[in-house]
């Protein structure tokens, strides 16, 4: 069993993917070829925004967003301690300081009730992370940000395709950023990412930043990065995007199957909660378990792969401890010791899900 089954997905899309890649090889425009703009137009339409800017990775998308907002030394950006390192990394690379707000115990997303207390006169942006495929409570976060005149950048690396109160993730704030890393719900065959906005100026600035700050050939009007997305990766996503609506529906069906079976078998594992005003694309299907190391070893011995997203919060990472201070974030610290992601992808079968649940039920029982 694969933790994420990309081989079956390729098998279903082989002809279209191969054709798209071959077209790029034939026209030879490997950088900013026609497929780049085609993909940007389709993604913008899917999300419901005016602008999509494809970039080299989800990390590039976040960094470019902060650069477009002119965030730099002396500034603070609020995010969460329970996330992939890139969320804090880009803040530091922009020259700012990360300020952390703990997460909700049942969703692992930013706890909006704690946000306002973290805002200072130096706060220049708020970056909620849409973890495990479900968005944060963006209306509550946006309302607080609006009172203080602070822009919100949604880190939607794990939630592309999800909806919140009738709107798509990446269309919930001034800027939305996502990743097309291969394991994401919509993934390419290498690194890739995109940022989304309805702001014409931010879109234009972001396009300049991603190509070394150029407003025209060899006219560098601002500091930038080499952050373009390869044409071949865009060609892959154009093929995958055709199947994506089916995959989103399938992910929903499979996540419900997991939840039902876990409940029916009374497994000693608690799935992350799903709020009634939003859905999840289940970038990972994650549960909370006690004695995780023992359970993982047991599952591995029975051919069931698992992963931990994430075993150490930002403020416990050696490179960030001095930056984040000595404050405790008890929910993030507890989740880091209990979260465990189970095999999940759109091509998983019901039989696969049932096998995982049976193995998990036995493993948690043996762990006691």
Image (cartoon, rainbow, N blue to C red):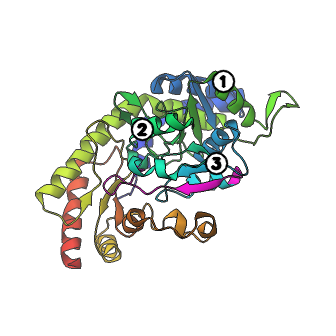
- Residue at left offset 54%, top offset 66%: 315
Give the x, y percent position of residue 331.
38, 63
Overall secondary structure of the magenta stretch? loop
Magenta stretch, residue numbers = 93-111
Question: Disc 2 or disc 1, which is closer to the eye?
Answer: 2
Q: Which mark is residue 138?
A: 2
Identify the residue position indicated by label 3 in the image: 122
Give the x, y percent position of residue 239.
49, 31
* Residue at the farthest right position: 218
3D distance between C-alphas at marks 2 and 1: 34 Å
Q: Which mark is residue 34?
A: 1
Question: Disc 1 or disc 3, which is closer to the eye?
Answer: 3
3D distance between C-alphas at marks 1 and 3: 41 Å
Q: Is residue 255 above or below residue 140?
A: below
Secondary-structure class at tag 2? helix
3D distance between C-alphas at marks 2 and 3: 22 Å
């Amino acid at each position: 069993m694969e933790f994420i089954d990309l081989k079956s997905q390729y098998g279903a899309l082989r002809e279209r993917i191969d054709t798209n890649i071959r077209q790029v090889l034939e026209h030879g425009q490997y950088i900013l070829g026609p497929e780049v703009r085609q993909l940007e137009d389709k993604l913008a339409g899917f999300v419901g925004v005016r602008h999509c800017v494809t970039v080299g990775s989800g990390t590039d998308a976040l960094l470019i967003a902060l650069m477009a907002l002119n965030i730099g030394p002396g500034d603070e950006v609020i995010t969460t301690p329970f996330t992939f390192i890139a969320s804090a990394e880009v803040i530091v690379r922009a020259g700012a300081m990360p300020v952390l707000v703990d997460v909700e115990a049942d969703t692992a997303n930013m706890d909006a009730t704690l946000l306002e207390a973290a805002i200072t006169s130096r706060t220049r942006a708020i970056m909620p992370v849409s973890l495990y495929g479900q968005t944060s409570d963006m209306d509550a976060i946006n309302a607080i940000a609006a009172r203080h005149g602070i822009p919100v950048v949604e880190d939607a690396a794990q939630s592309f395709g999800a909806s919140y109160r009738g709107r798509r993730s990446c269309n919930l704030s001034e800027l939305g950023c996502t990743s097309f890393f291969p394991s994401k719900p919509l993934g390419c065959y290498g690194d890739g990412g995109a940022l989304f906005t309805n702001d014409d100026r931010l879109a234009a600035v972001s396009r300049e930043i991603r190509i070394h700050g150029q407003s025209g050939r060899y006219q560098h009007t601002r500091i930038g990065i080499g952050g373009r997305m390869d044409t071949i990766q865009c060609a892959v996503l154009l093929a995958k995007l055709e199947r994506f609506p089916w995959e989103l529906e399938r992910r929903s069906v499979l996540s419900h199957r997991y939840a039902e079976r876990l409940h029916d078998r009374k497994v000693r594992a608690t799935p992350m909660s799903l709020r009634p005003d939003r859905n999840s694309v289940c970038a990972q299907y994650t549960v909370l378990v006690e004695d995780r190391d023992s359970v993982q070893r047991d599952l591995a011995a029975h051919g069931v792969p698992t992963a931990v997203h994430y075993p150490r919060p930002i403020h416990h990472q050696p490179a960030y401890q001095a930056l984040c201070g000595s404050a405790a974030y008890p929910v993030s610290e507890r989740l880091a010791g209990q979260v465990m992601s189970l095999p999940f992808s759109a091509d998983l079968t019901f039989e696969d899900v049932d096998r995982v649940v049976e193995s998990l039920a036995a493993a948690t029982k043996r762990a006691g």
